[in-house]
Amino acid sequence: MKRLIGGLFLLITVMTTVMVSGCTSNPASNEPADATAGLSVCPEERAQMCTMQYDPVCGVLEDGSKRTFSSDCVACSNPSVAGYEKGACESAQ
């Protein structure tokens, strides 16, 4: 029984160490922030047709500008859209 408890304790210790080590960050990184970080990314295969629903998204174009689209499908059908966020853009263009 003691051997089982010791093994269980070791397993829990190792699992906790692995999980915590994955939470570390590197604040000293000088890499520029990714413009698509936090965005829903469009699939590689773009839609050819979309339904006529209105569920606005804020599409982020490859040049970094933003534009409101009527839906995620419409945004992703545009090849210059890198990703999108739910909801209209704050300063719609």
Image (tube, grey):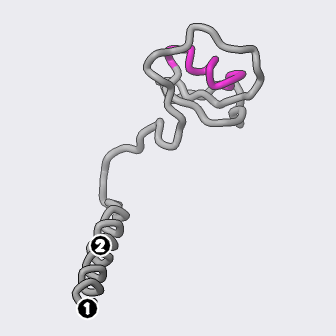
Q: Is residue 81 left or right of residue 50?
A: left
Query: At 24% from the left edge and 80% from the top edge, which residue is drawn?
Result: 7
Whether residue 48 sits left or right of residue 90 in the image: it is left
Disc number for residue 2: 1
Query: Residue 31's mark?
Result: none
Name the residue: 68% across, 25% down: 68
Side of 6 where 51 appears, left or right: right
Position of 27 relative to 1 (above/below):
above
- Residue 56 point in image, percent of width and height: 72, 28
- Where residue 71 sits in the image (x, y, percent)? 68, 23
Q: Which residue is mark 2?
A: 17
Q: Tag 1: residue type? A: Lys
**Neighbour tally class for label 1: few under 14, some 14-19, many 20 plus, Cα within 10 Å:** few
Task: Give percent across and percent down for residue 17.
Answer: 29, 72
Say which quadrant the N terminus sits in: bottom left
Amino acid beneath label 2: Thr
Please say if 91 is above or below 37.
above
Task: Calculate the distance from the C-alpha at mark 2 to the C-alpha at mark 1.
Answer: 22 Å
Q: x%, y% of residue 51?
A: 71, 14
The single residue placed furthest to the bottom in the displayed view is: 2
Q: Could you tell me which quadrant the C terminus lies in?
A: top right
The reply to whether callout 2 and callout 1 are in contact (CB within 8 Å) is no
Which residue lies at the image location 29% right of the left edge and 67% below the top edge? Answer: 18
Answer with mark 2 or mark 1, whichever residue precedes in sequence: 1
